[in-house]
Image (cartoon, grey):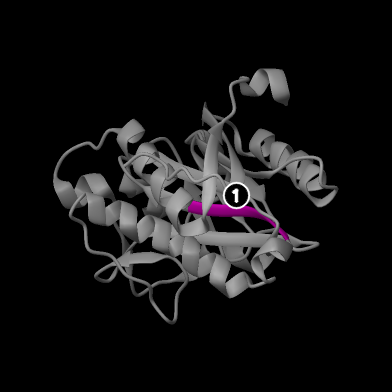
Amino acid sequence: MPPVVKAHMKVLTVHQIGMMEYDRAYHFQQRLLKQRIEGEIEDTLLILEHPPTLTFVKSDDLENLLISRNELQKRGVSLFPTDRGGNITWHGPGQLVGYPIIDLKERDKDIHKFIFDLQEVIIRTLNDFSIESFRDERHVGVWVGQEKIAAIGIKVTSWVTKHGFALNINNDLDHFSLINPCGIMDRGVTSMARILGRDVPMGTVVERILGHFSSVFGTLVEMESNSFSQVA
């Protein structure tokens, strides 16, 4: 589905980056956050993948890490503290990560609506692949049955958002056995590939995500032509 185009829409600048280390992407978010707060840029969305990475918010979250830090290092998995909402989670190749830098002052300062809309983008995207998903009142994210298919965690500063969503597409779900994902021990995780029984083209998912982002958020999507190395 192509992005919706209307003359009166707000602009959403999209950086489709590819693979990027978590700390580098975090610093890019920080830079964009400051620019958005100061009104120097429009709303922005980063689309990327991370190398094998675990992120956590509080030291208590590490109780949900099921192997030692030394073992993580041996397996080539990075571990980063971060400042989003939520608990410990996994990022890795085959998982699509989206970081929206959006000014909520222009959206009624409604954080709950923002999260609802992120979920809606993912739900509509999954529906395009005949995957039925839903919100759960107790746990933020997007779910298929008793399994999480997309995690959501955000941070809001001066009413501008950062962090965002991570949608499991073709990633190796065995990596989630290293943790209690998001601190939830009585449910599982799944991916589009597991549900469909085949790999899913990442580019097709990105196209659908951007189309639904345009529709749900009422934005005109503009792809950033510069590479990250030029703008970071």
Query: Of 118 and 170, which appears nearest the observer?
Result: 118
Residue at the spot 49% in from the left edge and 46% down from the top edge: 6
Residue at the spot 47% in from the left edge and 49% down from the top edge: 214
Judge whether residue 181 can be spotted in this image.
no
Q: Farthest residue toward the bottom?
A: 137
Residue 106 magenta-drawn? no
Q: Where in the figure is residue 16, as x and y percent of width and height?
A: 52, 31
Secondary structure category for the residue under label 1: strand
Q: Which residues are magenta?
A: 160-165
Q: Residues within 10 Å of mark 1 (few under 14, many from 20)?
A: many
Q: Where in the figure is residue 160, as x and y percent of width and height?
A: 73, 57
What type is the residue that disc 1 sits on?
Answer: Pro
Query: Of 211 and 25, which appears nearest the observer?
Result: 211
Q: Is residue 122 above or below residue 187?
A: above
Residue 177 quadrant: bottom left
Q: Farthest residue toward the right?
A: 38
Q: Where in the figure is residue 91, as x and y percent of width and height?
A: 48, 45
Q: Is residue 210 above or below residue 116?
A: above
Query: Of 126 and 38, which appears nearest the observer?
Result: 38
Residue at the spot 73% in from the left edge and 26% down from the top edge: 232
Q: Farthest residue toward the front?
A: 7
Query: Of 149 and 5, which appears nearest the observer?
Result: 5
Q: Is residue 42 above or below residue 124?
A: above
Tell whether 116 sits left or right of 129: right
Judge whether residue 151 can be spotted in this image.
yes
Residue 163 magenta-drawn? yes
Tell whether 87 sits left or right of 82: left
In the picture, the quarter occupied by the N terminus is top left
Q: Where in the figure is residue 155, as x and y percent of width and height?
A: 68, 61
The residue where tag 1 is placed is 100
